[in-house]
Amino acid sequence: MAFFPFQDQTETSLLNQLAENLKGNDKKGVHLLEIKHLSEAPEQAKTFVNACKNNNLELLVWIAPALQNNEAISQAETILEKSDVAVAKLYYPPLIEFLSFHEQSIKTERMFAFPFEKLNWSSLKAIEEALQKVKAGDTLRLSGEVLSLKTITEALLKGIEKAKDSDVFLWNQFQKMDQNQDGTLTVDEIYVLLSQMGFSKTEVESLVAASDENKDGVLTFEEFQANLQQDIQKMLEKVNTQLVYSLIEKERYQEFLIVDNQFDPQTASEILHWMEEVAISAAHQEEQEKTALTEWMNANALPFLGVEVLPGKGLFTNRKTFSEGQ
């Protein structure tokens, strides 16, 4: 499979995550339109068609949010249908991955708010499974799993608790910083994370130098782990994992999408309308199998913990994630 991300390559996009999990030698070209790039759908469709033609691919798989009557998606569909290549379309309901929109409030305030109690939620895992089976001419609509906010909150809480195990925590933190996955951390890789916390390049260089036992300019996991000056497990046990959710008015959630997540007003309105339609259809349905939710939480809870590691030092965290009085 060939994956074509057309957004900023510095982003950790959903399509990049798909590409990491799927390997194959078939002649499929795959592109996933993320909800935050909704208005760009027609242009992305044009670029996708041209890229697939240039790479002599036999099937284009277009993955997009399952919004009804969206003008941008309709225009993109027309472009795909008028191309002289085979096309399959796959539409997804709200993704569990959208919880990342709430990452900041979860890791600092231990709370998040949502306008609907119950939705049909899907996951990238479901998209992966559909990609393996899709054929030319198919139009597939993922049904998702009916999940309540209470269930999602409970699953996230369990995932955050598991992320507090010191061995798992340190390895996951190391892997998160090891961008090229070569088993070592460079100053530049560590700086990508620590610069977001206000650390200068010089400060990062000093932290690495203090932990770099063989002075080769990089940190192995053993060096990363051995030079921490705190009892990490004891510190992690103090991290507060209490988590609550609340329902908020739709207007406030739309403002949250615009102000906190940089959606344009039109896209934010479209998302809200989409989710409301999904919520209406899910309102009287029973909750379903939670396997995809549990798997996602176990694999993705670390960012919600709100704790990072300074090489050669210890934990760095927002104080609100610790228990009161600590």
Image: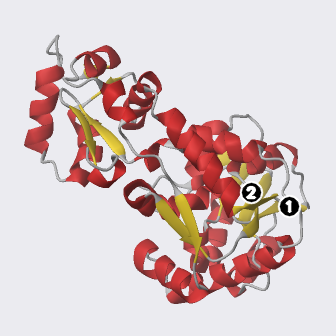
Check the image and report above or below for 12 versus 216. Answer: below
Camera-side residue: 71 or 197? 197
The answer, for residue 271, to whether it is visible in the render is yes
Residue pointed to by mark 2? 122
How far from the left and from the top, in percent, is residue 87?
Answer: 82, 61
How far from the left and from the top, in percent, is residue 50?
Answer: 65, 63
Residue pointed to by mark 1? 143
Residue type beneath disc 2: Ser
The answer, for residue 128, to whether it is visible in the render is no
Instruction: Give the residue displayed 80% in from the left and 44% down from the top.
Output: 129
Camera-side residue: 178 or 110? 110
User: Of label 1 and label 2, which has the lower sequence position?
Assistant: 2
Check the image and report above or below for 212 versus 154. Answer: above
Side (left or right) of 159 relative to 227: right
Residue type beneath disc 1: Ser
Q: Are marks 1 and 2 in contact (CB under 8 Å)?
A: yes
Side (left or right) of 10 relative to 47: left
Camera-side residue: 23 or 265? 265
Q: Element under label 1? A: loop
Badge 1 crowding class, 10 Å Cα cut-off, few under 14, some 14 to 19, many 20 or more, is: some
Q: Element under label 2? A: loop
Dividing the picture into quadrants, the one containing residue 47 is bottom right
Q: Quadrant of the N terminus?
A: top right
Badge 2 crowding class, 10 Å Cα cut-off, few under 14, some 14 to 19, many 20 or more, is: many
Which residue is the extreme one toward the front? 325
Instruction: Give the residue displayed 57% in from the left and 70% down from the top.
Output: 246
User: Marks 1 and 2, Cα distance to the nearest angstrom?
Assistant: 7 Å
Camera-side residue: 322 or 173? 322
| Scheme by which the image is coloured | secondary structure
